[in-house]
Image (cartoon, rainbow, N blue to C red):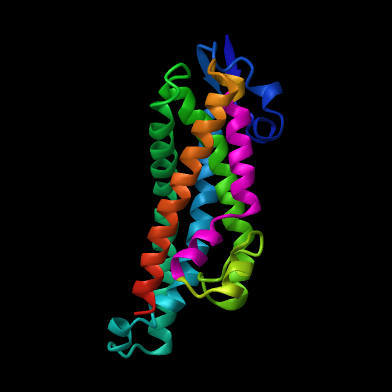
Amino acid sequence: MEHHVHVWRGLFKPEDTLHNLRESQSIHGYRLRLLILLFCSSIIFGLVFYICAAEWLQMPEVVKLKLTAEQEFSAAILIGIGGAIVGLIIPFLIIGSMTLSFWGFFRDIGYRKLFILHTYLFVIILVAIAAHIPYMWAFGSTEILSPFGIGPWVKAVTNNVFLTTLAGWITLFSLWHLYTTVKLLMETSLKPKRYIYTVAIGLHVTFILILAVINMMYHLQLNG
């Protein structure tokens, strides 16, 4: 049996596209779509790093160098190029780490097929970042909390760095990611629904906590 990779159909109609993935012996269309994914990731992270450059160039260590406007612009371009290169690596790191985390609970699917599933899910992550870029660009900062989540509301009532960064990761996109994860696993795993819900929610909460801690440490370092 063959499985044809259709990312968008897999995200919105997994029951129509993933019903044969569990039994399939060959995967078609994956390499091309992976290349497209890497290209999009490179562009998105290049833009994010370019926006980050304005903040990084204001760090005390850099300010001491007394760069000219032309040098700062060149540095920002180089940082953006570095981000584009990082964007080619990040998908493998995120997809690989998430696949490894889920593989311990879903051995019935297999590592290779779980990797393919998380390639589908990484598209949601890219969409979330891309949707946030206009706001980061408008304010010239990557510290802007996503308007698609509860972050701005929590920020309005507390200045606690951990709580605001934690809330910043709870968005419509993270809920979409969780919902799609459950749907994809139900189409490819033989595990009971309660087991799938428990593992998926538990791992997502763990990931959000880890990201919140990392984000908090970054902002504390950035703000001295």
Residue depicted at x 38% and y 90%: 68
Q: Is residue 7 visible?
A: yes
Residue 173 belongs to magenta span = yes
Relative to residue 16, is residue 176 depicted above or below? below
Residue depicted at x 43% and y 74%: 53
Q: State left or right for residue 13 relative to residue 50.
A: right
Residue 197 position by quadrant: top right
| Quadrant location of the N terminus in the rendered image | top right
Report the front residue among 211 and 22.
211
Q: Position of residue 220 (x, y in %)?
A: 37, 73
Residue depicted at x 34% and y 73%: 221
Q: Position of residue 76 (x, y in %)?
A: 43, 74
Residue 121 belongs to magenta span = no
Report the front residue among 125 and 209.
209
Report the front residue among 3 and 128.
128
Relative to residue 43, is residue 117 depicted above or below? above
Q: Is the stretch drawn in magenta largely helix, strand or loop? A: helix
Q: How many marks?
A: 0
Q: Position of residue 28 (x, y in %)?
A: 56, 21
Report the front residue among 55 and 203.
203
Relative to residue 108, is residue 201 depicted above or below? below
Q: Which residues are magenta?
A: 161-185
Residue depicted at x 46% and y 30%: 115
Relative to residue 221, is residue 104 depicted above or below? above
Q: State left or right for residue 17 relative to residue 67.
A: right
| Quadrant location of the C terminus in the rendered image | bottom left
Residue 70 position by quadrant: bottom left
Q: Position of residue 145 (x, y in %)?
A: 57, 67
Q: Is residue 31 visible?
A: no
Q: State left or right for residue 97 relative to residue 117.
A: left
